[in-house]
Image: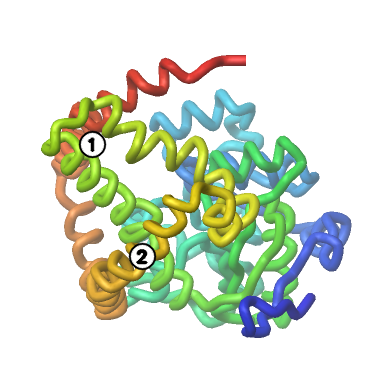
Amino acid sequence: MATINFGGVQENVVKRNEFPLKKAQDVLKGETVAVIGYGVQGPGQALNLKDNGINVIVGQRKGTTSWKKARADGWEEGKTLFELDEACKKATIVMNLLSDAGQIQAWEGMKKHLTKGKALYFSHGFGVTFHKKTGIVPPSHIDVVLVAPKGSGTSLRSLFLSGQGLNSSYAVFQDATGNAQERALALGIAIGSGYLFETTFQKEVYSDLTGERGVLMGAIAGIFEAQFNVLRQRGHSPSEAFNETVEEFTQSLMPLIAENGMDWMFANCSTTAQRGALDWKGKFREATEPVLNELYDNVVSGKEAEIVIEANSKPDYRIKLEEELTAMKNSELWQTGLEVRKLRPTK
């Protein structure tokens, strides 16, 4: 484990050269790892584990779209693909990758298979942190750990296949065997993490819920809409408004920021852009910081968890969700984007 200075703060980070795949394989030797759920994170984590030589099986409800996807990905019914109950029974490590709502529904059936010495793994701290709302309280005789890739399961898989890795956080909630941390780190390396940084279940879910509602998804979607609308209202064409709002950001600037940082991107644009960005970034920070504080307070209080649980429990949730997503898809902003993307040169 390395100690790295992040902007003046010392943090512990686990890198592949310090915890190589061979060590992960040794730690997990003799374990049966059951990936429960084959939705957002399940496919990427399960396939990476399999390719890294770990004894892994998949648990999924039979007949679902995810069951069919698992079969298409090469998991064999009765050999490496089982119903949830059977997979949990066979496992020594249960990787609970169901949706937050799915975890609530499946918990009582899963809990009876969590016998002494097993490990329960999450990639999100939601269920355990908000246990008063979810009812998910792990028994005291098992290890409870978390590895949370900082990206989608699709990204985790594609980066793995290209020889790279997605950074992940890890946490130990409960160490019943004395080996919980080693199990967590081994699983983190085996699923394809580029490196692992320490957190807690609580901090992971607080940062995750804030991030996805804030900069990662909610805020960026909202500010895209706001700037596009302003440009359209001021007489700019849809293509110009989209290019100045989304296309240049995603295709030109974000790759530069990802590779070299915001300061480098600022230093390598026009002096006119530099001056304007430096002058206006403070105004945007001051305008949005109170909103983000309100958001964080809602997360900590459990209000956001309540909203999620209540929404997901409604029988027509999927229908209503599809209506909202369709409305976004059919907006002028994203219909313009559909056409702009078609114009990108191909190799």
Q: Nearer the viewer, residue 203 or 214?
A: 214
> Between tags 2 and 1, which lies in front?
2
User: Can the viewer see residue 269?
Assistant: yes
Vertical comparison of 263 with 57: above or below: below
What residue appears at the point 23 percent right and 36 percent down from the top-left corner?
Answer: 325
Q: Is residue 125 left or right of residue 184?
A: left
Q: Is residue 267 left or right of residue 10?
A: left
Q: Position of residue 343 (x, y in %)?
A: 43, 16
Q: Which element type, helix, strand or loop, lies under badge 1?
A: helix
Q: Label 1 sits on what residue type? A: Leu
User: Can the viewer see residue 95?
Assistant: no
Give the Cα separation between the discs numbered 2 and 1.
35 Å
What residue appears at the point 63 percent right and 68 percent down from the top-left corner?
Answer: 118
Q: Which residue is mark 2?
A: 279
Vertical comparison of 202 with 333: above or below: below
- Image marks 2 and 1: residues in contact by CB distance under 8 Å: no
Q: Nearer the viewer, residue 52 or 287?
A: 287
Which picture quadrant has residue 248?
Answer: top left
Q: Label 2 sits on what residue type? A: Asp
Q: Position of residue 294 (x, y in %)?
A: 23, 75
Q: Position of residue 136 (x, y in %)?
A: 38, 70
Local crowd size for mark 2, using a 10 Å CA cut-off: few (<14), some (14–19), many (≥20): few
Q: Which element type, helix, strand or loop, lies under badge 2?
A: helix
Vertical comparison of 298 with 52: above or below: below
Q: Quarter holding the N terminus?
A: bottom right
Residue 141 image label: none
Q: Position of residue 301 (x, y in %)?
A: 25, 80
What residue appears at the point 65 percent right and 35 percent down from the top-left corner?
Answer: 79
Q: Which residue is mark 1?
A: 325
What residue appears at the point 57 percent right and 42 percent down from the top-left corner?
Answer: 155
